[in-house]
């Protein structure tokens, strides 16, 4: 197949960008030709390839309406891509149905699929609209357009329920994948790390790193004095004040290490292997890649019950799901105090569960759905 893949900001570093990178590489290895449409890309995630072309949004003369200018740019670029490459199918790798709408307007007979991480922009606030627009995102204007796409994929049952409840759209659940790097070498699971905790994500309020540091300081350290917490993330330009708040908290709290720069997979693997527990504090998140990465290195996940990721954790077997911050702390303390044999059992199950999320499984499922649309 010749596939046009659309993701507007592949120069950023987040879950959707990494997942798109995984898919692009896997589909190439399966023999497909790809054209990736974006505003810009990270060359480490999106290198050149013999079966791969990149098409960047074309500049258009500006008007007084920046939204109109962006949409004209999208229209011009996708139109050129259709004429130049004659794709068999289009895949939009983010919840932006504007791209599906433009594709269908330009070529109604062409199949268009969407991979939806969540059907709403949870991080959108009035003062952040311009930043979204600069990234070729159109939040607050598109939710009623989801039905334009021919086929919808979602990253979890949590997202699928939200899509159906709000827009009456059925979708196909395709759980994400993590990079092959995390599977290259099996961790030594019989070795029990010290009482270390890790948490990973962008520095945005929704991740609740400030809450994690406070409960670590006020509760976990009291129960396990030798415990250490490592927080890894990258600042988000939309939430500079929150990043500064987390940084101040980390600097003023004993045994908290803050790493605020992008790390390579090899560096992340080392951090995950030194941790007993991975803690995810964002309630209501559709899914999370970092907990999977941690599980693949033997760290035991403690995640909110109200989240997409809770679907892949069997409570008390391969990890723990919690309903309150107090419950989260109790599970973390329990894991940090556990003896070798008891901890090994849950650690082993967490690792085995992570093996489902390999890139080839993810790409094969996506490919199967795209083939349905090829005419």
Image (cartoon, rainbow, N blue to C red):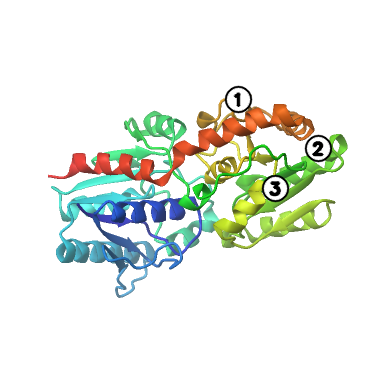
- Height in image: 171 above or below 85? above
Sooner in the amino-acid sequence: mark 1 or mark 2: 2
Question: Residue at left 67%, top 58%?
Answer: 243
Question: Residue at left 70%, top 40%?
Answer: 191
Q: Nearer the viewer, residue 110 or 257?
A: 257
Numbered disc total: 3
Sooner in the amino-acid sequence: mark 1 or mark 3: 3
Callout 1–callout 2 Cβ contact below 8 Å: no
Say what secondary structure mark 1 lies in. Answer: loop
The Cα–Cα distance between marks 1 and 2, rounded to whole angstroms, is 22 Å
The Cα–Cα distance between marks 3 and 2, rounded to whole angstroms, is 18 Å
- Residue 156 shown left or right of residue 275 in the figure: left
Q: Quadrant of residue 165?
A: top left
Which numbered tag is attached to residue 274?
3
Residue named by callout 2: 220
Residue named by callout 1: 317
- Residue 187 shown left or right of residue 371 in the figure: right
């Amino acid at each position: 197949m010749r596939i046009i893949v659309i993701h507007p900001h592949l120069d950023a570093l987040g879950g959707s960008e990494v997942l798109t990178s995984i898919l692009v590489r896997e589909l190439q290895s399966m023999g497909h030709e790809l054209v990736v449409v974006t505003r810009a890309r990270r060359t480490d995630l999106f290198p050149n390839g013999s079966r791969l072309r990149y098409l960047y949004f074309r500049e258009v003369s500006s008007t007084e309406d920046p939204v109109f200018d962006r949409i004209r740019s999208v229209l011009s670029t996708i139109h050129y891509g259709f004429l130049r490459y004659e794709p068999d199918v289009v895949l939009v790798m983010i919840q932006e149905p504007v791209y599906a709408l433009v594709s269908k307007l330009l070529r109604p007979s062409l199949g268009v699929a969407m991979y939806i991480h969540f059907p709403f922009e949870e991080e959108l606030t009035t003062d952040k609209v311009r930043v979204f627009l600069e990234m070729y995102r159109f939040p607050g204007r598109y939710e009623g357009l989801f039905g334009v796409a021919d086929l919808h994929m979602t990253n979890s049952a949590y997202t699928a329920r939200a899509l159906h409840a709000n827009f009456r759209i059925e979708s196909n659940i395709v759980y994400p994948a993590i990079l092959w790097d995390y599977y290259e070498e099996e961790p030594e699971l019989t070795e029990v790390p010290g009482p270390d905790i890790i948490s990973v994500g962008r520095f945005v309020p929704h991740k609740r790193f400030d809450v994690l540091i406070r409960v670590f300081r006020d509760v976990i350290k009291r129960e396990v004095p030798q415990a250490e917490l490592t927080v890894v993330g990258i600042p988000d330009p939309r939430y500079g004040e929150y990043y500064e708040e987390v940084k101040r908290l980390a600097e003023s709290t004993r045994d908290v290490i803050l790493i605020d720069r992008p790390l390579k997979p090899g560096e992340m693997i080392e951090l995950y292997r030194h941790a007993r527990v991975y803690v995810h504090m964002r309630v209501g998140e559709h899914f999370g890649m970092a907990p999977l990465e941690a599980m693949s290195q033997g760290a035991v996940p403690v995640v909110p019950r109200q989240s997409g990721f809770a679907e892949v954790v069997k409570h008390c077997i391969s990890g723990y799901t919690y309903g309150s911050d107090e419950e989260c702390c109790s599970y973390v303390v329990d894991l940090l105090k556990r003896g070798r044999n008891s901890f090994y059992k849950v650690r082993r199950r967490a690792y085995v569960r992570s093996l489902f999320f390999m890139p080839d499984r993810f790409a094969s499922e996506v490919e199967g759905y795209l083939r349905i649309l090829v005419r």
